Image (cartoon, grey):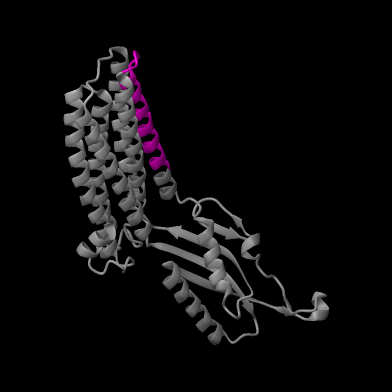
Amino acid sequence: MIRAIIKMFIKNHWDITDTSVREAYGVLAGVLGILCNLMLFGVKLATGLFIDSIAVISDAFNNLSDLGSSLVAILGAKLSSQPPDKEHPYGHGRLEYIASLVVAFIIFGMGIQILRSSVEKVIAPKAVLFSPLSLGLLFGSILVKIWMYSYNRYIGKVINSGVNKAVARDSLNDAFATGAVIVGIVLGRYANFPVDGLLGLIISLLIIYTGFGIAKDSVNLLLGGAPDPRLVESICLLVLKGKNIKGVHDLIVHDYGPGRVIASIHAEVSHSLDIVDIHAEIDEIEKRIEDQLGINIVIHMDPVKETSQKESGDSNMAFEDTGSAPEDTDMASGDTDLVK
């Protein structure tokens, strides 16, 4: 379903390297989130007030916080797509990480408020009215949240968006939370302890934990944490596919936001090669990496001297001062740095 919606509303939806297309994906996800969460907030709030359940009302306000998250996601998509300027020569892509952090704060704050209300409900419990219609509406809201998880997860993967991945995780947690509320309403008919208030406590702690996890991921991205080892391996393997490349070292990766990754690496070549020919090969490798991985990379040529069989003590031609191969490199802290 989400693929059909994307084709309907996003022109050139396949060209995710285009900043305007990335922005359109983010805005579409945000608008769908606003519509769904607004509907869920109204339904759950009315249901919670009708059956006098703090757990359901808490779940409703959790959806209201999700609505705010969708607004932040739209704002983040708009701001992060701005072109580079004098003050920000590498663009504004990291604004998307800041938007994820704001989403985390919204989720965390709402969790604290729900926690306080749930404690009050545990101290002074009230009977919850059982209603088949209310249960049906809550089951329907779970299906909506599962769909929201699905489309946000899909869009997050397509455009590599931390905001959408965060919203997807939050949507799945919401589905589990609503399921717990349904179980609590049913158990409340037979239990003599404050099931409703206790479930409100569990939901609030789940919300707080989700906010903390999203904040942690966002801060790591802003601080310049180590990249995915699979990305490091892919870059090294693509460089080593060059017929005249003998080794690689000193890979550095800078992440300035989704679709704005810049890297540099040293490639070892024989000192006897024609510099014009090897430069042309290096240009081809840089272009290949940009096309396949979407990374703007600069490859520095390191000429190494060949040693004969007698000097090297080996049956094959060897090279002096070769850098370590990808599997022998160590990861440094901060922006990624592969060193000898």
Q: Which of the two residues, 321 or 200, is positioned nearer the viewer here? A: 200
Residue 79 in view (yes/no)? no
Dividing the picture into quarters, in which one does residue 27 lie?
A: bottom left
Residue 153: image location, x then y, percent: 35, 52
Q: What is the quadrant of the N terminus in the image?
A: bottom left
Q: What is the quadrant of the C terminus in the image?
A: bottom right
Report the magenta stretch's main SS. Answer: helix
Residue 40 in view (yes/no)? yes
Is 214 part of what is drawn in magenta? yes
Give the residue displayed 39% in from the left and 46% down from the top. Answer: 218
Above or below 108: residue 69: below
Residue 224: image location, x then y, percent: 45, 51
Residue 247: image location, x then y, percent: 63, 71
Q: Which of the two residues, 21 or 59, is positioned nearer the viewer here? A: 59
Dividing the picture into quarters, in which one does residue 208 lie?
A: top left
Residue 38: image location, x then y, percent: 18, 41
- Answer with left or right where residue 225 lies relative to residue 85: right
Give the residue displayed 29% in from the left and 56% down from the top. Answer: 80
Is 196 part of what is drawn in magenta? yes
Provide the residue span drawn in magenta.
190-216
